[in-house]
Amino acid sequence: MNNRAGYDIIIVGGGLAGLSLSILLARKQYKVLVLEKDSYPRHKVCGEYISNESRAFLLDLGMPIDTLALPQINTLQVTDTNGNEVLASLPLGGFGISRYSLDAQLAELAVKAGVELITKARVDDIVYKDELFAISAKNNTYTAKLVAGTWGKKSNLDVKWNRAFVKGKNKSLTNFIGIKYHIRYNWPADRVGLHNFRDGYCGISQIEDDKCCLCYLTTAKNLQANGNDIKQLELNVLMQNPWLKDIFTNAEFLFDTPVTISQISFEKKEQVLNHVLMLGDTGGVISPLSGNGMSMALHASKIGAGLMGQYLEGKITRPQMEQTYTQLWKQQFSRRISTGRFVQSKFGKMQTTAFFLKTMNLLPLLRRMVINSAIGKVF
């Protein structure tokens, strides 16, 4: 093994949380290394809608959002398998941008800020001893004072550490799959749609270049019941919703094959484990229907960067940093995750969904309360 030492912080995972965290810390002149298992640009399963609570933060990172002619989204549409719909305004609104574009641009900003970024670097182990971390990746050992885990929904490290959510005790919250396409389709630029089907839901919204992101979540059991064939699942299940039938029949699909992810879990996760601070989906996965997963990842990076800076400056101890991060994470995100989990439990069950939509139409105040509870504040 070759030995390399001397980083203030190593960030495992180069997604939204990891890249934004790296930029914030590099700007403070800390020596930062990001280890990312893939390369850029890359597609990821994601709804690709970002709430405007994150707009100012992204602009501060250097993202030229205002010059990219991105679709501005301010309306939510929810439908059931009978074709019934609910339309509601989104208090803050948001915008659409692909992860293919966003992650690559953030990676470029990170390198410009002084971050060392190594791609195609799968981390095999993280060991903490005597106030120092040793990270094994690409036949090298890297050492640092701090490590942040930003590797996403699930990785080999989660399995290695035997994290509680990997055991999947609550079957209603585990073993979901996600499927994503980019398509061309005549969809309103100001609208994000959530179309229900049996045991799942599908989101659609515009992104850059007049394309749409079409992304759905369902259970692995649903796919298995259709011979583990995605096309059969879409034909037999998704297209029972007339809105989805029109999309899958008339859209131009731009990928040869969809982007997929399996074994998604919505069970609770630890925010700190083995002295590693967990950010983004690594610390907790929110239901995609809330449309706030990306904003949560970005917000967590701001919280984490502030506390990590205080630790490196000697203003707080490691236990104080870890305890405060956990408290702040729960204050900001626990209620939103719980709300998303509750709403998701009403989706995918056809009679329950129809009743839920009818109630939302009859009680606009309740509808606003549900929507507002899943949206954060500008940070």
Image: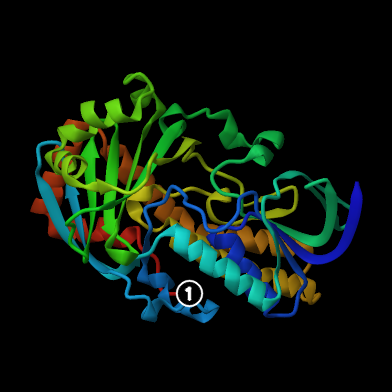
Tell me where residue 40 appears, x and y as whole percent: 56, 58
Q: Residue at x 38, y 57 (%)?
A: 48
Q: Residue at x 61, y 35 (%)?
A: 164
Within the image, what quadrant is residue 317 found in? bottom right
Q: Is residue 230 left or right of residue 113?
A: left
The foreground one among 298 and 190 is 190
The foreground one among 70 and 21 is 70
Query: From this viewpoint, is residue 126 visible?
Result: yes
Tell me where residue 191 appears, x and y as whole percent: 21, 61
Query: From this viewpoint, is residue 130 visible?
Result: no
Q: Residue at x 58, y 29 (%)?
A: 167
| Neighbour tally class for label 1: few under 14, some 14-19, many 20 plus, Cα within 10 Å | some
Within the image, what quadrant is residue 233 found in? top left
Location of mark 1 (residue): 58
Q: Element type at marker 1?
A: helix
The foreground one among 192 and 117 is 117
Q: Residue at x 14, y 57 (%)?
A: 87
The amino acid marked with disc number 1 is Leu
Q: Is residue 76 above or below residue 339?
A: below
The foreground one among 352 and 151 is 151
Q: Is residue 102 left or right of residue 25?
A: left
